[in-house]
């Protein structure tokens, strides 16, 4: 029960987060049609005009009207972002100007033909990737799409119509999108086609004819209706899950599809996605990497397959195992897969087919309680070319070595012949073949086996110097020798291949381990960069640069071994902004010459690792390792930064503590004797009430002098506190009138006989301030006025809360301050030339310091008609709370 | 003013590490009829407070061994003897903490002897428990605690319940400082601590009604950053 509620809460939280991330991301609306000509663009433009009328800012990012009049008229009503022109081999191509659209920052962008493939040189190879970036930037997008271009349906479309679909859009994009079906009955569409209302690209008319058959159109229509219906199904499933706490995956199902370097894997992947959708379960795409090297074409096909799986929403797992079946089953058990999907064995060659069937049999036998789904995989035009690199890769040298060893063994046998007889040479040859197998690849071993068998026969088995064998016994011996030599050679060679694969894996692990270990000791950014560049040079022999944000862009760290062109830095900047890999071997700006990986942790993005890859291809394992390097570096950079921040904080706290202790100690040492002297003098004065006048006057002098000294010491200490940042505000609500009254009362004696009038509002003036500090401010201002003005002139203090800030004014009718000195009166130790002796020149400095500590301002002005007006202004960001009567 | 009846000699314990301050206090206090016991650090202070049973304690906050607040707490664990804090300026937080932890009052150095003696008298008076008087008079102000009535110059002043509670608190502790926290807790309850604006507004109204000249308060004085003190006029 508790568990269920918990799961409910989790599901709800996930739904909220999804909602929120959607709010931050733009929303995508897809106008889906069964085929060209149903009026998607028209429907999209109509919807866009409705949005304009609703007051939204809509722009056309890219719309193709194909010169149709109605559509043109609609499009003319909308602002347009000019297209970018790309020059590709002398042909000018037009594409959406992604940066201009981003910069325009409209609410809604119209982008036609989601499945379009961009011209080479554009940022992304596909337009849907442009759209993703727009959505990421928070822009809403309207787009159009034909059902045949939906990745998971492309296969079905091909089967139904026989037309090859080249441009597809991953299904994942549609998951978060709103789908609007633009529907037209096939008969009407054909009518429009006949009237020339449908724009068709210049393809062979026959193909078009074949495609636009009523049976095709009906099938496509059904397909698009079902896609929209399925999509609604996804929505309700997510909803039901939040509402009722049904398991996220309806059943505990988990599908696993084996992915290989064959074009036939792709339909399998699609099939599995459809199946997983239907079951509402998760699915895995597993690739088992063997030791044999793939051809370049097979390698890229494999990467395409895995990318397809990833786009369709699979969890992609790659593992290394010499035995495909064992690898698949291991992952299936680890991941609790309930069904394994594999293709029916194909292959025209008998051997290949036989092997496939053997593997399948083993899979079925060893799968235990996991179901095995056998799916017919086919793809038009997909002729499975050679997948493995031919074994002859071993090189001519190895063949020569093998042949040489066999020849030498032959000579040795000839020499031994006198003592050995015809049969012993067979064993010596066998020994030689095994020795050869320890050093060379499969091909040379085969050659050595065959060659030695022939030599044995020709030179040693009677009748000698012919290939004929006279004795039946010898013939049997020869036959067995042949088989033993071949099998032995093969076995040894396979063990060696496994060993090599093991070694490669270990090399990767060691490289990562070493890198991590070296990096763990890095204590500065420079060391991290140095290690990173050094390791990349050592492990991959590729020059690399590390870029960090600085100035107004990315700046390369001087320890890098790669110098980047300006255009490459721009790619790196994009990668940092998007926190995605970019450049060569990626889907983002693949035209770049270097690969740019962001150094990111969850907390922040630190910079970019740019690698100029030395080889023509980047294998999955290498990419994995590279990404691991980048991730590790980012983690260490993060740690270094956090540690530095902590250290700074500690030092700051330490120095603050020291300053405070020092100030308190000085304060105590100065004040204690002063306090004793002042109190003693006061006590004497009180006790000597009946003493002679002169004596009383002298005592009074001591008391006054002490008071002044006390004040000067206080001011000096306050300035020291202020300058060392030790002044802390204790803000609280106060009645500003109380501040004036209390200050006046406490000044009492020092204001002497001077009359200070106060102009205060009748009601409490509630303000937030530090009462003690503001008492100093006001006290110093008043004392300043008393000291600098003639005895009979008035001094007035007023308090106003004029709307926002609190304004305190102290005005006098004294001589004022010469205009040129006005700005300087708040400076430390500044004393007006005309000032009477006795001041320290610190009072007004403190006034300014304390007021500024409150975030306020203080200014002095000469009054018309003589006198000085000092205005203190304290901002009051908070309104006073209401206080109910009672 | 009431005639001072000859009182028994009272003992004051001075806890301060500065010999000069101790000597000054000894002279001042002995001249005014106190017996003085000195302690040079916090530890001795606590011991003397237990052994010598002083009538009042003068405690410096900045002691070399124990924190003054700690000494205060240790004495308060078992004794209700009046404690007056000796402090310097810039120790507002410590002062407030001491008052909220049970100190009776504070004197800021440099002090004048008149003020010091007045604080000691007030502290001693409150140390004997709440006064018995039902009617308290200060100048032309008369507060009848039994009947909950307040007269100024002979005419009755209407106070709101909150104003009356504030006045009663302040006048029964006349001469003694009450911190914001103490006032807020007593009138509005524990949850109002920190809501100083209540205090500001209601106190302003109280002054408006009771002070002879509200712009120059003489009855209820503000103790900057600490609280309020009501001073009785003869």
Image (spheres, rainbow, N blue to C red):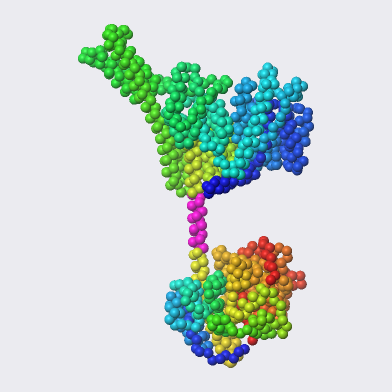
Would residue B61 be found to the left or right of residue A779 on screen? left
Would residue A67 be found to the left or right of residue A266 on screen? right
Q: Residue at x 64, y 81 (%)?
A: B145
Q: Residue at x 75, y 20 (%)?
A: A194
Most foreground residue, A523 or A18 = A18
Q: Quadrant of residue B202?
A: bottom right
Instruction: Give the farthest residue toward the front.
Output: A1
Residue B210 in the image, given as x and y percentages of width and height: 69, 79
Q: Residue at x 61, y 23 (%)?
A: A158
- Give the magenta-colored segment's residue range: A640-656
Question: Eyeballing the image, is B177 above or below A807?
Answer: below
Residue A708 in the image, given as x and y percentages of width and height: 59, 77
Would residue B49 be found to the left or right of residue B188 on screen? left
Most foreground residue, A623 or A490 = A490
Question: Eyeballing the image, is A492 above or below A239?
Answer: above
Q: Residue at x 50, y 23 (%)?
A: A344
Name the image quarter holding the C terminus of chain A. Answer: bottom right
Instruction: Give the farthest residue toward the left.
Output: A419
Q: Quadrant of residue B155?
A: bottom right
Is A779 covered by the magenta stretch?
A: no
């Amino acid at each position: 029960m508790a568990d269920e509620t918990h799961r409910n809460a989790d599901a709800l939280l996930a739904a909220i987060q999804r909602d929120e991330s959607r709010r931050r991301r733009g929303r995508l609306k897809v106008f889906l049609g069964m085929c060209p000509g149903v009026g998607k663009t028209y429907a999209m433009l109509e919807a866009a005009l409705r949005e304009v009328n609703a007051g939204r800012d809509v722009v056309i990012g890219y719309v193709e009207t194909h010169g149709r009049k109605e559509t043109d008229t609609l499009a003319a009503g909308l602002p347009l972002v000019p297209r970018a022109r790309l020059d590709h081999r002398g042909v000018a191509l037009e594409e959406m100007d992604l940066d201009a659209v981003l910069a325009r920052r409209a609410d809604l962008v119209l982008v036609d033909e989601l499945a379009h493939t961009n011209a080479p040189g554009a940022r992304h190879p596909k337009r849907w990737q442009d759209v993703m970036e727009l959505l990421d930037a928070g822009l809403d997008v309207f787009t159009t799409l034909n059902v045949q271009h939906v990745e998971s349906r492309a296969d079905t479309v091909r089967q139904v119509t026989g037309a090859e679909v080249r441009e597809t859009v991953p299904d994942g994009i549609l998951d978060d999108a709103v789908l609007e079906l633009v529907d037209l009955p096939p008969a009407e569409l054909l009518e429009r086609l006949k009237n020339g209302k449908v724009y068709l690209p210049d393809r062979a008319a026959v193909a078009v004819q074949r495609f636009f058959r009523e049976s095709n159109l009906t099938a496509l229509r059904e397909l698009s209706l079902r896609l929209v219906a399925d999509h609604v199904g996804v929505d309700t499933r997510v909803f039901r899950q939040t509402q009722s706490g049904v398991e996220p995956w309806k059943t505990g199902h988990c599908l696993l599809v084996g992915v290989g370097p064959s074009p036939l894997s792709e339909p399998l992947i699609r099939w599995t996605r459809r199946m997983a959708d239907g079951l509402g379960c998760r699915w895995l795409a597993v690739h088992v990497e063997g030791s044999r090297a793939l051809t370049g074409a097979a390698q890229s096909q494999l990467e395409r397959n895995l990318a397809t799986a990833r786009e369709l929403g699979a969890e992609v797992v790659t593992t290394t195992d010499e035995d495909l079946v064992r690898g698949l089953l291991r992952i299936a058990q680890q991941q609790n897969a309930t069904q394994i999907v594999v293709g029916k064995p194909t292959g025209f060659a008998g051997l290949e087919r036989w092997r496939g069937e053997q593997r399948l049999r083993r899979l079925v036998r060893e799968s235990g309680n996991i179901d095995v789904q056998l799916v017919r995989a086919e793809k038009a035009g997909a002729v499975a070319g050679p997948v493995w690199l031919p074994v002859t890769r071993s090189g001519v040298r190895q063949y020569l070595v093998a042949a040489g060893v066999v020849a030498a063994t032959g000579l040795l046998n000839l020499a031994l012949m006198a003592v050995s007889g015809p049969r012993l040479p067979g064993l010596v040859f066998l020994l030689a073949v095994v020795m050869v197998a320890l050093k060379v690849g499969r091909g040379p071993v085969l050659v050595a086996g065959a060659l030695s068998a022939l030599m044995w026969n020709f030179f040693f088995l009677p009748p000698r110097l012919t290939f004929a064998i006279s004795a039946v016994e010898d013939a049997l011996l020869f036959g067995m020798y042949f088989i033993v030599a071949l099998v032995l050679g093969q076995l040894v060679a396979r063990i060696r291949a496994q060993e090599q694969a093991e070694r490669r894996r270990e090399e990767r692990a060691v490289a990562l381990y070493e890198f991590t270990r070296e990096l763990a000791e890095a204590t500065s950014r420079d060391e991290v960069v140095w290690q990173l560049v050094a390791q990349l040079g050592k492990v991959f022999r590729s020059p690399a640069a590390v870029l960090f944000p600085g100035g107004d862009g990315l700046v390369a760290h001087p320890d890098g071994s790669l110098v980047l062109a300006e255009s490459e830095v721009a790619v790196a900047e994009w990668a940092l902004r998007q926190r995605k890999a970019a450049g060569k071997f990626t889907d983002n700006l693949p035209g770049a010459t270097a690969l740019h990986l962001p150094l990111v942790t969850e907390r922040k993005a630190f910079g970019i690792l740019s690698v100029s890859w030395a080889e023509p291809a980047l294998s999955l394992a290498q990419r994995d390792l590279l990404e691991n390097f980048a991730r590790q570096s980012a983690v260490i950079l993060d740690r270094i930064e956090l540690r530095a921040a902590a250290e700074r904080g500690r030092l700051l706290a330490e120095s603050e503590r020291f300053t405070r202790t020092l100030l308190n100690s000085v304060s105590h040492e100065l004040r204690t004797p002063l306090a004793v002297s002042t109190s003693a003098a006061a006590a004497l004065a009180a006790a000597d009430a009946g003493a002679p006048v002169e004596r009383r006057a002298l005592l009074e002098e001591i008391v006054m002098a002490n008071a002044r000294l006390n004040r000067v010491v206080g001011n000096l200490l306050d300035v020291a506190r202020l300058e060392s940042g030790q002044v802390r505000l204790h803000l609280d609500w106060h009645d500003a009138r109380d501040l004036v009254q209390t200050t006046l009362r406490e000044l009492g004696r020092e204001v002497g006989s001077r009359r200070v009038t106060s102009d205060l509002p009748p009601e409490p003036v509630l303000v937030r301030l530090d009462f003690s500090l503001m008492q100093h401010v006001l006290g110093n201002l008043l004392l300043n006025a008393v000291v600098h003005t003639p005895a009979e002139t008035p001094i007035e203090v007023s308090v106003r809360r004029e709307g926002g800030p609190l304004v305190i004014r102290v005005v006098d009718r004294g001589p004022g301050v010469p205009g040129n000195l006005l700005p300087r009166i708040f400076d430390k130790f500044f004393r007006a030339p005309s000032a009477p002796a006795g001041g320290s020149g610190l009072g007004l400095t403190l006034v300014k310091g304390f007021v500024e500590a409150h975030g306020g301002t203080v200014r002095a002005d000469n009054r018309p008609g003589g006198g000085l007006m000092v205005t203190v202004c304290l901002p009051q960001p908070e309104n006073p709370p209401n206080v109910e009567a009672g | 003013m009431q005639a001072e009846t000859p009182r028994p000699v009272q003992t004051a314990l001075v806890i301060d590490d500065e010999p000069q301050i101790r000597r000054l206090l000894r002279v001042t206090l002995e001249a005014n009829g106190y017996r003085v016991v000195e302690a040079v650090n916090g530890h001795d202070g606590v011991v003397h407070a237990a052994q010598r049973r002083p009538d009042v304690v003068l405690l410096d906050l900045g002691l070399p061994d124990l924190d003054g607040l700690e000494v205060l707490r240790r004495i308060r664990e078992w004794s209700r003897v009046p404690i007056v804090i000796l402090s310097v300026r810039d120790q507002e937080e410590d002062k407030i903490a001491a008052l909220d932890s049970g100190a009776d009052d504070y004197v800021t150095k440099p002090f004048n002897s008149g003020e010091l003696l007045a604080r000691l008298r007030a502290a001693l008076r409150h140390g004997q428990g709440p006064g018995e008087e039902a009617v308290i008079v200060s100048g032309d102000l008369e507060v009848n605690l039994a009947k909950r009535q307040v007269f100024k110059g002979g005419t009755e002043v209407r106070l709101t319940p909150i104003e009356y509670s504030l006045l009663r608190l302040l006048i029964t502790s006349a001469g003694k400082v009450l911190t914001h926290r103490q006032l807020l807790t007593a009138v509005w309850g524990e949850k109002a601590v920190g809501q100083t604006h209540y205090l500001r507004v209601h106190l302003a109204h109280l002054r408006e009604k009771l002070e002879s000249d509200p712009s120059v308060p003489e009855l209820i004085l503000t103790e900057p950053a600490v609280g309020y003190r009501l001073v009785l006029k003869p």
